[in-house]
Amino acid sequence: MDDRTRAYLQGRFGDYYRSVDIVAPPAAGDREWGHIPWTAGTGTTMVRHQSLLDLGDLGDFLAREAPRHAYFSAARYADPSASTMDGKGWREADLVFDLDADHLPAIDPEATSYGGMLVACKDALRRLLDILETDFAFEDLEVVFSGGRGYHVHVRDDGVRDLDSEARREIVDYVRAVDLDFDGLVTTVQTGTTTRRTLRTEGGWGRRTHEALLELVEELRATDEQDALDRLRELDGIGEGRATTILGAFRRNPDAIRAGNVEVGGPGLRMLVESIARETVERETAPIDEPVTTDTKRLIRLPGSLHGGTGLRVTRIDRDALDEFDPLVDAVPDRFTGGEIRIDARAETAVDLLGERTKIEAGENTVRECVGVFLMARGDAEKARE
């Protein structure tokens, strides 16, 4: 990034911060604050170990410094401005989850458009929120578009803030179904002289597997017999004989299946349950970034600030408005939508912002300012001389 581009972006970031009111996180005075300024060269310099008292008024600080990136700590400290982590006096920390499109198993960043990555990441966010709200019953959640390639979820329920790193890792392992004991999803129930193996339907991955099993039962009961058998044989370990036995159990004993009984279909049904469990895990897990969640002293992006790699706003999302949220529209700062600028693009490309696709040619282009800021922040263009 050349000096002209850097000066332009810092100036416009400052204009943005002077036009908005940034809402600080809860207990802002107990948190460490950090930022990355617009330094020259290819590297970045993190300025940290600051308290809100050091910064002064948050809005004034952001308008004055116009940082490239702005952060606050998930942790709350006795002395957040202490120069060493041990000296800060850790008290507690929010439980933070980070989803980044780069970590999605089905996404190739080189072959997927920026918009396509954000769509895929939003699907992963839905899965994450379903687990957090349904399986853990967390209530105090804040959902945030990171301004880059993903989303953050801040959990601030009283019961989680004092968890240490190991306890947080257990939550990560559950969300990602790491080393999930599939045999453990089934429990043995003794009734008199009768032993019955039953899915753990009361919660967790057992409940999720049971729900998927019931969906399959209803699907197959309403399907032609041959098609139903073919569907069962698609699953691991299910041959023709076992498929026939399982289908018969589905049609003869639906109440037993609804109760979680996996004995009514013999060994084939138990194998089917394991296959369904693996499919359920693959479909419903969320590929969160483990180090972010397990780090009790993590710095995380400040909602309302600008992401220095895109020029998009780090945006809080109302939980009920998640489906309608479009980061390529809703996270574009109004300050950058009113005019045009000249840029010098490194290569031919296209940018999708505000519901419009802008085609960029290599060399000089006149574009909407938000498009120019996006390309310059990403390092794909420089500010042309006007």
Image (cartoon, grey):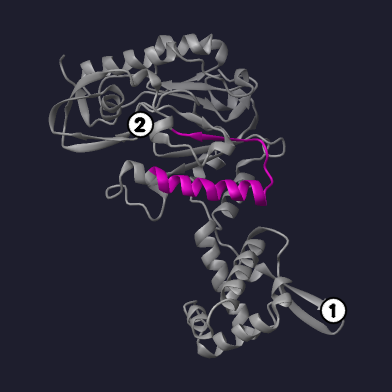
Image quadrant in which you'd find residue 90: top right
Q: Residue at x 51, y 34 (%)?
A: 144
Q: Amino acid at mark 1?
A: Thr
On whether residue 357 falls in the magenta region, the answer is: no
Task: Name the front one of labels 2 and 1.
Answer: 2
Disc 2 secondary structure class: loop
Q: Residue at x 61, y 50 (%)?
A: 131
Image quadrant in which you'd find residue 29: top right
- Identify the disc placed on residue 72: none
Question: From what the image shows, is residue 385 above or below residue 292?
Answer: above
10 Å crowding of disc 1: few (<14), some (14-19), many (20+): few
Magenta region, main secondary structure: helix
Q: CA distance from mark 2 to mark 1?
A: 63 Å
For the question of whether residue 71 can be seen, the reply is yes
**Left or right of residue 250: residue 191:** right
For the question of whether residue 169 can be seen, the reply is no
Question: From what the image shows, is residue 265 above or below residue 71?
Answer: below
Q: Position of residue 361 (x, y in %)?
A: 14, 34
Q: Amino acid at mark 2?
A: Leu
Q: Position of residue 71 (x, y in %)?
A: 48, 25
Q: Position of residue 31 (x, y in %)?
A: 58, 23
Q: Residue at x 57, y 67 (%)?
A: 277
Question: From what the image shows, is residue 57 above or below residue 355?
Answer: above
Disc 1 secondary structure class: strand
Looking at this rendering, what residue extends furthest in the left direction?
Answer: 363
- Identify the disc placed on residue 191: 1
Query: Which residue corresponds to mark 2?
Result: 354
Of the 4 image quadrants, the one containing the C terminus is top left
Give the extent of the magenta segment.
118-146
Of the 4 image quadrants, the one containing the N terminus is top left
**Left or right of residue 266: residue 348:** left
Question: Between residues 366 and 272, which one lies in front from this camera angle?
Answer: 366
